[in-house]
Image (cartoon, coloured by chain):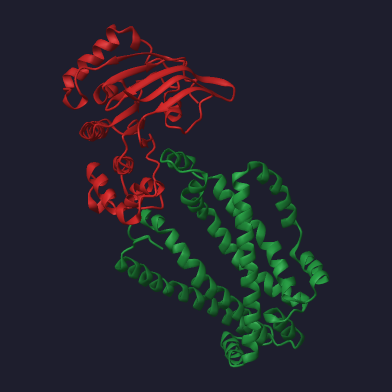
Chain colours: A red, B green
Amino acid sequence: MSILALKAIEHAYLGRSVLSGIDLRIDAGEIVALVGPSGCGKSTLAHVAAGLIAPKSGRLSRGYERHAMIFQDPSLMPWATASQNIALGLRLARVPRTMRGARVAEAAAQAELQPGDLDKYPVELSGGMRQRVAIARALAVQPDFIFFDEPFTALDVALRRRMQDLVIGTCSEAGLAGLFITHDLHEAARVAHRVAVLDTYGRGILGSRALPGAPAERSDSAVQDWVRAALAGDPLFRHIHDVDERRIA
Amino acid sequence: MSASLPGRAGRILEFLWSGWAGLAALFLLAALWQAGHEAYGPFILTSPQDTLAAVARLAGDPASWALAGLTLQRAITGFAVVAAAGTALGLIAGYSPATLRLARPLITVLMGVPPIAWIVLAMIWFGGSDATVRTVIVVSALPVVFLGAAQGIATRDRSLDRMAQAFGAGPVRRFLVIGLRQTTTTLFPALALALGTAFKVAVMAELLANAGGIGGALANARINLDIATALAWVVIAVGLLIAVEYALVHPVKAEIDRWRRAAQPWGVKR
């Protein structure tokens, strides 16, 4: 039973076709990573799926109750403390004020934030801590589907690994489904159950490959072997590192 | 805003302590004033001491309290109209680029007309009444507030809008939770400027329209060549502005800008 299905989705921006013929289904409890070369429309696809952009045509059906989104930029409100930022989703979902405190504390603990960090403003936090706040904000609304829009691209390698571990842990614990946009095949192979590849020009999903085992149990060597084999022998991944900088807005 | 009580008390004490710097600046000004007085004599520039004595004399007279109250009331009501209308119009223009494009040339025209011309027109329309003073305040201060509000909305961080939308906020809630708060960055300096303009324009309009208030008292002092009283009224007008600014503008600004202070390293907080 799929909880997110995109059927023949098409999107054009200022008359130029960005996405066309997109078919993608995501099952309950499944994390699908969407990879593709830069500028192919991965983020646009996530925004369409999350309802931030209305598609030009096609059908979008959602079987989940509540989604959350984590962006590349943490998108925190600079004037609000970390805990107020985490509570934003609850405030927008009209959760009563008295219940917000406990939910914020719970989400902050899940994202491994210290209670002392919660009273700080975003300017006082490091880049990694800000992204943790963004993750906690997403978890606080207790979603059953999470959109990840290249969330860790701006972080350094060690920090990115820790964040991926955090995502893998919380998603497998709660059985969350998600769409993880990334241009890093290694990251995709770590966090996802299945890797889908978007066409270089956004003309459809070229195909997808399931990864062995659950992300939480996958060893580093298994991930590396899979990536190496995919890049060396699988025609599906042949173009994912192509870059045409003219297409990147 | 569940700020801890000790934190707030600390900020208030820090603010009061910063008053020493303000006092030092005021005494420096008084010293220069005294030097001017000694160079040019009491007829051109009354000494600060005599001016303060004149202020004290005026403060003892209930009639002058009524005059100052009249000017204060005109400036505050004029400012309130400017703040409400300017903010509302500016927010609309911020969301609608077409409106902003239409409004910009109008603002230029409005700012190009000298305030004195407005005073003449307002005197013809309303005579020497409150409405004259308020009209001139509105016309002189509205463009600043309008542009401040419009700028705040137009330059808002759109990624925050997108984020709020992803969490299910409709346009109205996005405006209330995200947009309005970002406007304060540009709207607040504009409002502070408008408040100062309101006081200055109120006194000027009163003087020229012979509408009573502090401006009227200044006109009388000019007729009598009473430099001490004239300076005393100036001191009183500035004092009123400072009182309103520190009672109204600064507390709100401090609350809104708390996160900016958090960004400053320890020791350079001002």
Furthest-right residue in view?
B124
B159 over B143 or under it: above or below:
above
Q: Quadrant of residue B198?
A: bottom right
B28 over A89 or under it: above or below:
below
The answer to whether one can see residue B221 in this image is yes
The answer to whether one can see residue A150 in this image is no
Residue closest to the eye, B54 or A35: A35
Say which residue appears at 57% left-offset and 61% top-offset. Answer: B191
**At which x and y percent is residue A222?**
18, 18
**At which x and y percent is residue B204?**
71, 73
Residue closest to the eye, A185 or A137: A137
**At which x and y percent is residue A17?**
54, 19
Q: How many marks?
A: 0
Say which residue appears at 40% left-offset and 49% top-offset. Answer: A78
Report the quarter where the C terminus of chain B lies. Answer: bottom left
Residue B202 is left or right of residue A171, and the answer is right
A183 over B31 or under it: above or below:
above
Residue A40 is left or right of residue A148, and the answer is right
**At which x and y percent is residue A33?**
32, 23
